[in-house]
Amino acid sequence: MNMTKEKRNAALASVGLLALSIYVMACNSSPSFSPDDTKVLYPAFDPVTGVIGMSVYDREAGSSEMLFLLAGYDHGSQTNTPPCPALLRGQWLPSGKDVVIAYVGPGGNNKEGAITLSVIPWAGRKPVKTLLSECDTEKAGEFFMTSPLCVAGERLFYRGGPNQLFRIDLRTFTRTEHEFEDAQGDMAIYPAPDGRGVFYLEQQTDPKEQTVFGWLDPETFSRTALMTTTNRLRDETSIAYDRQGRTLAYLEADDGIANLTVWRDSQVAFSRSVDTQSEKLAFGNAILTASGKSVLATFARANGTNATSYGLMEIPFSDAPAREVTFIQEAPANGEDSVGYFQAALSHDGKTVAIASTYLGAGDKGIKPEDCALFLVELSNPDWMVTKVPIPMPARKLAESQ
Amino acid sequence: MIEALSHLFAAVCGQNPGHTWAPGGMLLPCCQRCTGLYVGAGIAALLHLGLRPKMTSLFLRIHGAFLLFMAPFGFHWVAHGPAMRTITGVLFAFAVVTFLWVPLASRFTFHVSKPGVWRYFLILAATLLLLPLAASLGGTFVGYGLSLLIAWGALALAALVIADVGLGLLAALRWLCRLISLRVLA
């Protein structure tokens, strides 16, 4: 064969290979803990003021760095130190260059308070941008806090009411309001696991009681139903879903029995019960594992009447036994709702779970200082290796706990 | 089957549900652009095998343009909808398959036929028209059919990549042998 022609053919094949590689990489880029899975954003105490802020843990360096602190005084506050621990929620933006932190609390000129959003640069020197948005009603803050922080691309979505949704462009802080006028029940929104979009749950009551799970177009707010389920959702029902919305799992604890129902294509694909050997068990949030064959959930289990243990449970979509690890053995009993402050996040490679117990340490009946930590669970390790990153409690809290 | 395919394609596709065709309510295993890519690759591979269009300089330049056509859409410089995502995927696939096919066609000296070129472009045009239509209007059966085509296209692409990498390695080995023999002679 002619040598020049052979070179041309090789060059053409290389162009084809290169183009295909670029295409596959471009179509598969996704955010993560941080987009490269090397850092974890988590709530931590500021040792000086005692207020709760957001820290970043560098998994390679094994060190943490405080990124954000927020303190506030209520009207008529009588103290000289920042009084209330702020309930902050944070999320990496898909670029990995910025972090968004959300907070609901006092602020603005009305008594209903305000939602505060801060976009904080992580890579490079840029201004910190903060948006203060007054709540229209007293319930608005509650709706905001009871929904997961829903970031899709560079936009944040939050509920302002049962059928009201707000979209904030995090680059321009443009706010768009949308009312679901055709909704047949309360609408809840959930972030897609890869941060690319928004799922919704519509709990219809009329003409019949059913729950529609679907995809919400972040541009137009139009809804595409993906499946309809007949489960009646309770406040304590945790839901888990895959990134395509093909699988939807409901997890509830009822008198010590964990009930798991898995739906696919509007049909029950699997259901099981797990005896959790405790009359009082509550689940925090639930996450579908990367394999899609089990669900992970944080739990709180009452040990008698005075103590609670906290941990992580994996329930397979088979008859295999559930697996669990307990991080905190003897915490003061704070009621089952406290598990809501003990939520897990899964890294985008699906290999690591991160859970911080900061908020369990913030209450009046806080956990022991040694139990206040960021727990990283390596799921790829057969023994579920746990790395415990201590979260130092402020001096004030330490004095109270002694 | 769809579950297994969806799991496999998760490694190479973002699977954004907002950008995925759902014929008959059934989500395809990959996004709209990847549907175009894999279905297009499967069809292009069959066309190169069956019609063996002549790889003239014009033919290659047209496919180079198809490849470049992806850039403004793939990088989201131009706003576009579901149909355009699939169309750019198909054109990109035809270009990639052609470029990967060139070394194989030359090496194994396939016979070429001129009418094949016309039929080739006719089937390409039909694919561009029918694929978005089928994906948007079709029912569950269409969904299964498209999923099979996607799987076939992915296999065809993988086979072409393996064959080209193999040829590249062989060429490198030959070049190395020649270099060694030249040094020995010197």
Image: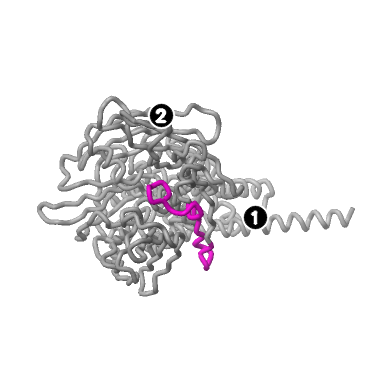
> Residue B175, relative to residue A189: is it above or below?
below
Front-lying residue, A171 or A9? A171
**SS at mark 1 in the image:** helix
Which residue is located at x 36 percent, y 41 percent? B84
Q: Position of residue A184 (x, y in %)?
A: 15, 47
Which residue is located at x 27 percent, y 50 percent? A214
Could you say which quadrant of the image residue A142 lies in?
top left
Q: Position of residue B153 (x, y in %)?
A: 44, 57
Q: What number is the disc on residue A339?
A: none
Span colored in magenta: A361-385
Q: Are marks 2 and 1 on the same chain?
A: no
- Dot 2 alpha-carbon crowd within 10 angstroms: few under 14, some 14 to 19, many 20 or more: some
Amino acid type of disc 2?
Answer: Thr
Which residue is located at x 38 percent, y 27 percent? A172
Q: Is residue A265 magenta?
A: no
Q: Chain of mark 1?
A: B
Q: Position of residue A226 (x, y in %)?
A: 26, 54
Could you say which quadrant of the image residue A287 lies in?
bottom left
Front-lying residue, A125 or B168? A125
Q: Is residue B164 visible?
A: yes
Q: Main secondary structure of the magenta part?
A: loop
Front-lying residue, A360 or A128? A360
Could you say which quadrant of the image residue A209 lies in?
bottom left
> What count of labels does the image hold?
2
Real-space Cα separation, disc 2 to disc 1, in angstroms: 54 Å
Residue matched to label 1 = B168
Apparent side of residue A302 relative to residue A204 in the rendered image (left or right): right
Amino acid type of disc 1?
Answer: Gly
Q: Chain of mark 2?
A: A
Residue matched to label 2 = A130
